[in-house]
Amino acid sequence: MDMEVVGIGLGSNMGDRLNNLRTAVQLLKNAGFIVKKQSDVFETPPFGVKEQPYFLNACLLAESDMEPKKILRLLKSIELKMGRKRRMRWGPREIDLDILFMDNLIYRDDELAIPHPRLQERPFIIVPLFQICPKWKHPLLGVTVEDLYRNINISEIVKITNL
């Protein structure tokens, strides 16, 4: 497979949140990802389940020649290595790694959907993506990250530091 640009979302709201994000980036690099751009780190309110600590979120663009399912397995193995435990849906987590998109690929099966099916509904993804790839066009919706950014509420999202 040729090198493709993969958009990856990172989130953490347990333990040393910033260190968790930075450790995940290093583990991705160690696994062969070539990080091209990374967003700043943003503190964001929890999504879905409100009674939990705020998250730190960031996104990165990386090049990889791995197939989508292999990337998914790698992200899940990094989460496990970093101590993520399965709790409730949208609940607290040590680290969360998601494939947001792979260039213009549209991929769906029972385990993986690319682009991420709820990307457009999540300010905690759109804000960091806007920093690093405002012109990326969602292959199903036909809109850019910049278009999505213009239509979200960013009032509760605070830039913290660099990744």
Image: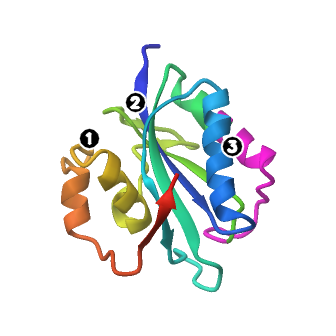
Q: In whole angstroms, how far apart are the C-alphas of marks 1 and 2?
A: 14 Å
**Above or below 10: residue 47:** below
Where's residue 113, x and y in %? 47, 44
Question: Closer to the camera: disc 1 or disc 2?
Answer: 2
Q: The residue tagged with tag 1: helix, strand or loop? A: loop
| Quarter of the view holding residue 49 | bottom right
Neighbours of disc 3 within 10 Å: few (<14), some (14-19), many (20+): some
Where's residue 127, x and y in %? 35, 61
Q: Name the residue under label 3.
A: 76
Identify the residue at horizontal 72%, vertical 68% (top origin): 14
Q: Disc 2 marks which amino acid?
A: Val
Q: Name the residue under label 2.
A: 5
Tag 2 and tag 3, C-beta contact below 8 Å: no
Identify the residue at horizontal 71%, vertical 42% (top origin): 78
Question: Closer to the camera: disc 2 or disc 3?
Answer: 2
Q: Mark 1 points at which residue?
A: 139
Apparent side of residue 146 relative to residue 77 in the rendered image (left or right):
left
Q: In whole angstroms, how far apart are the C-alphas of marks 3 and 1?
A: 25 Å
Q: Disc 3 marks which amino acid?
A: Lys
